[in-house]
Image (cartoon, rainbow, N blue to C red):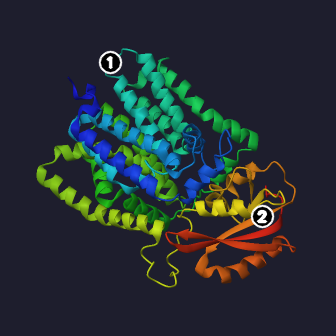
Amino acid sequence: MSEKKLNYFQNKDFLSLFLIFLIMRLIFAYFLPLGVDEAYQITIGKEFDWSYYDHPPLSFWLPRIAANIAGLESILIYRLPSIIFGSITIYALYGIGLQICGKATALWSGLLYCISPFFFFSGGAFVLPDAMLNASICMTLYLFLKSQDTKSYYNLKLIMVGFWLALSFLSKYHSILIPLALLVYFLTTKKRFYWIFQSRIWIVALVGSIGALPVLMWNYYEGWPTFTFHSARAHTEFSILNFVKMFVGQLIYFSPPALILSIWALFVVKKNERINFLIYPALFIIFGFNVLFLLGSNGFPHWTMPGWMLTLPLVGLLLKQKGQAFKRKFKIWLIIFKMPIWVIICAFSFHVNNGWLTMHQTIIPKWDNTLQFMRWDEFGKKFDDICCDDDLTKIGFLNWVDAALLGVVLSEKYSIRVLSDDPHHFRYRENDTKPEMGYLLVPVLKNNSDKRLEEIRLKVREVDQNMEYLESLDVKRGERDYARVLVFKILLPGPKS
């Protein structure tokens, strides 16, 4: 039987890789507190919307769906959809490797994805759109390649390709580059040029376009805020410094050995139709965003990661073609770069839960600030005990980050209002634009709380001269009081448009 037609889970090497990293992701997902972006998506996702200010809706919908199905709220439940999509990505990358050049290529593809900290966490454990994006891109390409092996059930296979393309549109805006890249591939490949004139190929486009409808509907109704937000990041001023900074970030995220070998593979691997089918979308993403970085656009290095992800089967193919001595050197360099990063990650994971790095110190040092990566459950319970005796259920925050972190643990009976000029999607949670009495919550480090209290009093008084400071609620990190939430009663101004 052809390797392409084997059940992947009958392959012991793949099954071991799949299960080991699935268990690892489950452990980290259970153990680690929520980060800011995760908390934001969970808090905002408590109320359904067709799309959201920052991203398409899928990564906002799924944690709420998972919690409703499970009937409980927990970090692991929130992260479970991302873990599932991360597993799908590994499966699809392995399948793409098989389609290109067999088992060795496929195993390298899956392994390099799994050991990358960025792909491990953002692409397979955390509540972020990257997990859904990576899985939908890989499945779109994998299923299309697989559909060419046999013409049986061809239309159904193309519908499934379209389904995953639709999910990519629901995940992140990178996804628009995939159909554009494949269109260029069809137009520039002699044997594939005729495909764009076949009605069957437009099945993919028709089904895929359904995924863009929620985003377009919501933006049309709200005045296109998402497109305004993202277009504001674009610049046209040539900046080598910005490009170098972003490229160094990509080296760190992807690791120097893997990135260097990916670039090498793009040049030296012998091309054929299947490999080009992978290269076109990879290059569209990598070059597209790096050009934006070169032009000075405000962005993040991880924007190119889906493109580098698609080069992993090429790296696997290159390694297959090289001798054992080359593979040994590559493994050594991988260990040299990856091992320290994973040691730091494990140390950090323990620290954010119990503060073990500084627990022996009487005063917590300034560098030890994990406010944006800690468990706030204790606060949610304490606040319910003191809040709303006078039926005030409007909760205010000075910024969207605080609203996201504490909003996760607040009861759904409270509505949130962000007072800053940049409230993100919280501005669309307001039905009433009038000033309203409520509580203002401000999280601070406990060992700095006295100084911060005076600063925040002055700031809050600018909002409401008659504000009233009520009390502070301490939150532990491990066995030690670490954070403090300052509680004010104020007249919350109407939300800013």
> Does residue 454 appear left or right of residue 479 in this picture?
right
Q: Quadrant of the N terminus?
A: top left
| First of labels 2, 1 by sequence position | 1
Disc 1 target residue = 150
Q: Residue at x 75, y 39 (%)?
A: 221
Marks 2/1 in contact by CB < 8 Å: the verdict is no
Counting every numbered tag in the picture gives 2
Please state the horizontal and vertical placement of residue 489, each as a whole percent of the image: 80, 68
Residue lying at 61% horizontally and 54% vertically, measured from the top left: 40
Front residue of 55 and 101? 55
The residue located at (54%, 25%) in the rendering is 207
Using the rendered view, name the quadrant where residue 462 is placed: bottom right
Identify which amino acid the numbered label 1 is placed on.
Answer: Thr
- Which is closer to the viewer, label 2 or label 1? 2
Which residue is under mark 2?
439
Residue 157 spot, x, y in % from top left: 42, 21
Give, as a three-letter code, the residue at label 2. Answer: Tyr
Secondary structure at numbered mark 2: strand
Q: Secondary structure at mark 1?
A: loop
- Compared across the picture, whether 485 is left or right of 76 comes to right
**Residue at image point 45% right, 22% down:** 158
Q: CA distance from mark 2 to mark 1?
A: 63 Å
In the rendered image of this protein, does residue 177 appear above or below residue 202? below
Towards the viewer: 100 or 131 = 131
Q: Is residue 246 above or below residue 106?
A: below
**Is residue 269 in sight in this rendering?**
no
What numbered label is drawn on residue 179? Answer: none
